[in-house]
Image (cartoon, grey):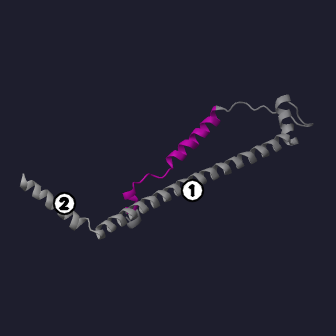
Amino acid sequence: MSGARNKVRQLKYRLKHDFLTPENVVLAVAVAMCLTWTYQSIEAMNRNWMLTERLNMERKNLQLLEVEVETAELTNEYLKSEEYQELAARKLAGKQLAGEHMVYLPENSEAAKKKHEVVAEVTEETTAPEYSNFEKWIMYLFPNR
């Protein structure tokens, strides 16, 4: 028992005289203050960045809304124009100007449909072959190969 007491006394003495000196206490307080200041600075920078991002997003939304409002105003102006009203009257009421005639075209013939299919096949056949990134590098480094 007395051995354990002596060890406890020795530990208390070392703590008191070796570790808890005024210089060590001041140093520990200074380190704690520096860590607190660093943490608070990082938090403030993070908060400022988040607020900047939010502000930028709101500015983008504002610009988008301004463009939408401008588009709506231009659409309203177009709908009020004589040009649109004439086109709408022609479409809805079947009105036409003097000298205009309606021409009805027949459906496309089989020859016309085949012509477009041949053009599509030719464009598919003439596309450039796909090369991998490695093959492109080899062709770039050794062009005569």
Give the position of the C terminus as an image quadrant: bottom left
Residue 114 is situated, as x and y percent measured from the top left of the image, at: 60, 36
Badge 2 is on which residue?
Answer: 12
Q: Which mark is residue 77?
A: none
Residue 134 is situated, as x and y percent measured from the top left of the image, at: 37, 58
Q: Is residue 131 left or right of residue 116?
A: left
Residue at the spot 26% in from the left edge and 65% down from the top edge:
20
Camera-nearest residue between 72 and 39: 39
Q: Is residue 43 left or right of residue 92?
A: left
Residue at the spot 14% in from the left edge and 59% down from the top edge:
9
| Mark 2 element type | helix
Is residue 19 among what the camera can see?
yes
Check contact, mark 1 vs mark 2: CB within 8 A: no
Residue 136 is drawn in which quadrant?
Answer: bottom left
Residue at the spot 76% in from the left edge and 43% down from the top edge:
72
Residue 9 vertical placement versus 106 (above, below): below
Cα separation between marks 1 and 2:
53 Å
Q: Is residue 133 magenta?
A: yes
Residue 22 vertical placement versus 85 (above, below): below
Please state which amino acid type lies under the numbered disc 1.
Answer: Thr
Of circles 1 and 2, the one toward us is 2
Residue 50 is situated, as x and y percent measured from the top left of the image, at: 53, 53
Q: Outermost residue toward the top?
A: 93
Badge 1 is on which residue?
Answer: 52
Camera-nearest residue between 75 and 95: 75
Residue 107 is situated, as x and y percent measured from the top left of the image, at: 70, 30
Q: Is residue 13 left or right of residue 136?
A: left
Q: Is residue 37 magenta?
A: no
Is the magenta region chiefly helix, strand or loop? helix
Magenta part of the protein: which range?
Answer: 110-137
Q: Earlier in the sequence, mark 1 or mark 2?
A: 2
